[in-house]
Amino acid sequence: MNSTPPNQEDVENEAGSPNEEPAFGWHEEEENEGPPVLDRGFIGMLTAAVGLILAAAWVSEMGALRYDLQIAAPSVVRPGAPLPLRAHLLDRASPGALPLESIELELYPAPEGEVEQTERYRPAPELESIQTWTIDNPSLWDGVEGRVTVPGVESGDYVLFARAQVGGEDSPQTVAHPLQIATDPRPPLPVRGNRRYENQRYALLERSGEDAPEQLDARFVGGSASLDGEEAELLVWVGEGAAEIRLEAVEGMGTVSFREDACESGETSGVVRCLLRAEGDHAQLDVVAFRSGVEVGRRRVQLPMGTNAPRISVPSLIAPDARDARLEVQHIGDIAIDIFHESAWVDTRSGQDELTFQVPVAPGLWLAQARDAPLYGTDHHMRRFFVGTLEELAHNLAGIRAQQRWPNPISQAIADGRFSCAPAESVHCSDERIARFMLSGAEYDGVEGALYTRGLAQAQERDEGKRNRQRGLAGFLIVLAGILVAIAVGRRGLRASKEADTIREDGKVSRAPVFGASLFVVACFVAAAMIVMARGCF
């Protein structure tokens, strides 16, 4: 039987061209002629791409800043006045603060005119420091705290340069704090609220009753009605039309408890003291006025709630020659307290469970603000006190713009000589009681006397040009890695397409998906490069 031998072309079409490279990175040999050969070019390009990505990560984070020296100090101070300061050292690699043994402070004149960023946060080489200090008094939060005295220099802008050494680091950590030394009167302290929600804030609501006393103005001492189970002190100014004051709970408006004799007895036009306990997120109560045992009016009060800060005790009026007046702070746990005098932050201290120290006797208005954290938070307890007479206090408060947030007509009436109180000899009309009521009006909102300055932010701004160059190089390396990966993907795709051409009978396979995939890979790496150039790798 005769058979026609296959021609050479048919054999090649069935077995594939001997000169054509197969797909998937393997050189397939004849059956049983040995294992496939690895595509070293493909593996080499992927290895190079991975190396470029690792190099980009190293370049981007080379010389990355780790430590952050932070100080809190006033931004404005008078010549010769005390300057309190707190300092903490943070580590980006671990939570919390690092132990800080001491910091060195240097006072320099601020640079004049426009200066480069590299010179803004470091003293000029030709300048000598005006004065140097060392603060090594430890605080409860692994930092240091204390106060120094500003030298009697001319008014102007200065820089307080702080330096701290970190164990194992050759270069010290630094931060430059802007400081204005001025003899002009201080502006009011920045005020901030401390109640999280509207129904937790103090509010003096509607008053009812045709024969109600003129005022029925109720204020909480220390700015809070919830003192972690302790009794809060409520002061009620009755005003013209003397009456006896009692408290009455409002159903469905929180939990408020008090004794039957919670308020001082007797009809008066002065200030009545009441004690109560409040629990929960919000609460209201009614202040009810009685005359000869008959109700004549009432006022609803929304209680200030939501704080468990340390509690402060201090007299309201202190004589300038007093030597035994003391300020006490009580709290279970850590305590931090700041002291302000006439809107100037003058001292800071910290302790545990209890702090007691002698009250300064410089004339004027003082403020003590306590909390249980080194930074300002939502919870605090405040007490104002005054060194001087009641008349001096009234004139002082009548001229403070910050008091206008909580109208206090009693201070203006005393300043104008129109205030009257009966019975004059009673405790309701004593100078201490009237002063306590006037001062409590400004104890609801916390104050911010410190300017926090971060050394890490300054170092990042100072080294911004260097960091941008590093991230630009990292982005270039990532794009280059993307090009290598795209070439490898395209190379493998084209080989697979040629292999498919030998199998299909209806024409060649389209190469468009191969090029599209390569372009998509490049686009992904370009996007990654843009992220790195904007934020770094980590």
Image (tube, grey):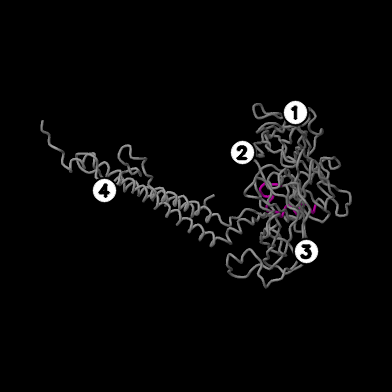
Q: Amino acid at mark 4?
A: Asn
Q: CA distance from mark 1 to mark 3?
A: 59 Å
Extreme residue toward the bottom, this view: 126
Q: Is residue 37 magenta?
A: no
Circle 1/circle 2 CB separation < 8 Å: no
Q: Secondary structure at mark 3?
A: loop
* Residue 238, image quadrant: top right
Query: Which residue is denoted by mark 3 in the rendering?
Result: 80
Q: Which marked residue is nearer to the observer: mark 1 or mark 4? A: 4
Q: Which marked residue is nearer to the observer: mark 1 or mark 3? A: 3
Q: Amino acid at mark 3?
A: Gly
Q: Earlier in the sequence, mark 3 or mark 2?
A: 3
Disc assigned to residue 294: 1
Say left or right for 389 vs 449.
Answer: right
Q: Earlier in the sequence, mark 1 or mark 2?
A: 2
Q: Residue 34: x, y in percent?
A: 35, 40
Disc assigned to residue 197: 2
* Residue 361, image quadrant: bottom right
Q: Amino acid at mark 2?
A: Tyr
Q: CA distance from mark 1 to mark 4?
A: 115 Å
Query: Which residue is denoted by mark 4 in the rendering?
Result: 19
Q: Residue 145: x, y in percent?
A: 75, 53
Q: CA distance from mark 1 to mark 2?
A: 36 Å
Q: Is residue 153 above or below residue 372?
A: below
Say left or right for 286 vs 9.
Answer: right
Q: Nearer the viewer, residue 102 or 155?
A: 102
